[in-house]
Image: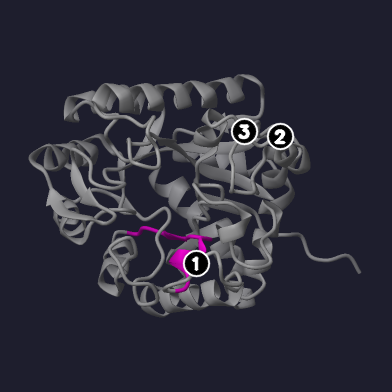
Amino acid sequence: MSPPPSPLLVDGHLDLAFNAAQGRDLTLGLEALRAADPVEGETATVTFGELGAAGTRVAFGTLFALPRTEQSPRGYTDHAGARAQALAQLDQYRRWEDAGLIRLLRGGAEVRAHLAQPEGPLGVVLLMEGADPVRDADDLPFWLGAGVRVIGPAWGRTRYAGGTAAPGPLTDAGRALVTAMRDLGLTLDASHLDDAAFWEALELGPRVIATHANSRAFVPGNRQLTDEMARAVAATGGVIGLVFLGTFIRPGWNPSQPRVGLEELAAQARHYAARVGWEHVGLGTDLDGGFGREKAPAGVERYRDVGHFLDLLPEEYRAGVAGGNWARWLTRHL
């Protein structure tokens, strides 16, 4: 008897164009990419071939502008620099689409039609991670016209909001941004928002998801969601994507230790499900999003291994977590 078909995968968060900007050719086979990888210390796991082998039909693909830090001296220092990075990544997605490697999806009907085809290119929903490329609220129609459908105002601190390890509320510009997002039908990604900014943003009434956010009940710090925040996302109908990064799975873990286990991530999935229901739990792997195989859970040597995680979940909920929950949200709300 042949094994049952794998469930379709929808990944809530992949930095595809950012990786291309770093010099990674995602059209290569994984071993060829690794042999020529310009990124040091992060063994790649993601290529288009790997995504296809995993059964991934749709991914939220980021426009991620990297700010200047001590570790990233070439990052942006102002809006113009952030915008230039985002536009270059937007161009990369369009070139991939022209080559038949992806299909950009801009609405629920397009997602539904794409998922009705069992084969074909990867569907990509454009997600802006960190809103500094947006000049101001009046600039949102440009990005909406370019295909962006989801925006996370923060990464660290931005001009719009407090973020990871940078506590603070929405700024005046941030309140104007979220209000305009609501009015234009753009979805708010709550990932990376500091608590104060999170609760302010939700009071403004936008559509909300968390593309890649693990549970603070397991790992402390404002990068993770509290149970109350998870309930608030779910109350809007949103989905929460689980991140495959060791430091987001086990508190205090570092790469000098054995890699965390997939069962530990499954425990976070069960925790979320007990509080918001399995229908609000999905994938947001963030694989190759600033980390490689070394920081992924044990057993995830390459992207196609994501399915091993699903095997640890209750059988009746696996298809939903794999992609069904995101697919439902996308077809109803994108």
Residue at the extreme left of the image, as rendered: 172
- Work out whether 249 lies above or below 94: below
Label located before the other in sequence (3 or 2): 3
**Secondary structure category for the residue under label 2:** loop
| Amino acid at circle 2 | Ala
Distance Cα–Cα, label 3 vs label 2: 8 Å
Kindly tell me whether residue 89 is visible in this rendering.
yes
- In this rendering, position of residue 263 left or right of residue 328: right
- Work out whether 82 lies above or below 176: above
Distance Cα–Cα, label 1 vs label 2: 26 Å
Label located before the other in sequence (1 or 2): 2
Label located before the other in sequence (3 or 1): 3
- Marks 3, 2: nearer the viewer: 2
Find out whether the residues at labels 3 and 1 contact each other: C-beta distance under 8 Å.
no
Residue 127's image quarter? top left
Disc 3: CA contacts within 10 A as few (<14), some (14-19) or many (>=20): many
Tell me, yes or no, whether the highlighted magenta stretch contains residue 43: no
**Secondary structure category for the residue under label 3:** loop
Residue 72's image quarter? top left
| Amino acid at circle 3 | Arg
Which residue is label 2 attached to? Answer: 36
- Front residue of this view, candidates 256 and 259: 256
Q: How is the image coloured?
A: one colour
| Amino acid at circle 1 | Asn
The magenta stretch is: 237-250
User: Residue 108: horizontal and vertical position, in percent?
Assistant: 46, 41
- In this rendering, position of residue 245 left or right of residue 180: right
What number is the disc on residue 24? 3
Q: Quadrant of the N terminus?
A: bottom right
Which residue is label 1 attached to? Answer: 254
- In this rendering, position of residue 172 left or right of residue 208: left
**Secondary structure category for the residue under label 1:** loop
